[in-house]
Amino acid sequence: MARDLLIMFGAFVLASALAGALGAANLGTALAFGQMAFALSAVYVLLKR
């Protein structure tokens, strides 16, 4: 379970940081990309089981 949470949290942080580094208009936009990555990784974790 801890590994699954790490995957989801890591996807959120990595996508948000990457969006910010690549020139997102503001922090809200970068966090929106983080939310999308979190949702995709949550689907991955659910389907993996």
Image: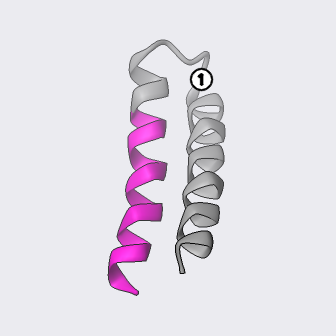
Q: Is residue 33 above or below residue 48?
A: above
Residue 30's place in the image compared with 23, above or below, is below
The residue sitting at the front extreme is: 48
Comparing 42 with 28, the one in front is 42
Res. 36 image quadrant: top right
Which residue is under mark 1? Answer: 26
Q: Residue 20's spot in the image, x, y percent?
A: 45, 25
In the image: residue 46, left or right of residue 16: right
Question: Which residue is at 37% across, 56% downward?
Answer: 10
Identify the image quadrant of residue 22: top left
Task: Name which residue lies at 61% across and 36% down.
Answer: 33
Callout 1 amino acid: Asn
- 25 vs 2, left or right, is right
Relative height, residue 32 to residue 41 (above, below): above
Would residue 12 be found to the left or right of residue 26 on screen?
A: left
Q: Residues within 10 Å of mark 1 (few under 14, many from 20)?
A: few
Q: Main secondary structure of the magenta part?
A: helix
Quadrant in the picture for the C terminus = bottom right
Q: Which residues are magenta?
A: 1-17
Answer whether residue 12 is magenta in the image: yes
**Residue 31: where, in percent of width, then height?**
58, 41
**Total of numbered circles in the picture?**
1
Which corner quadrant holds the N terminus? bottom left
Mark 1 element type: loop
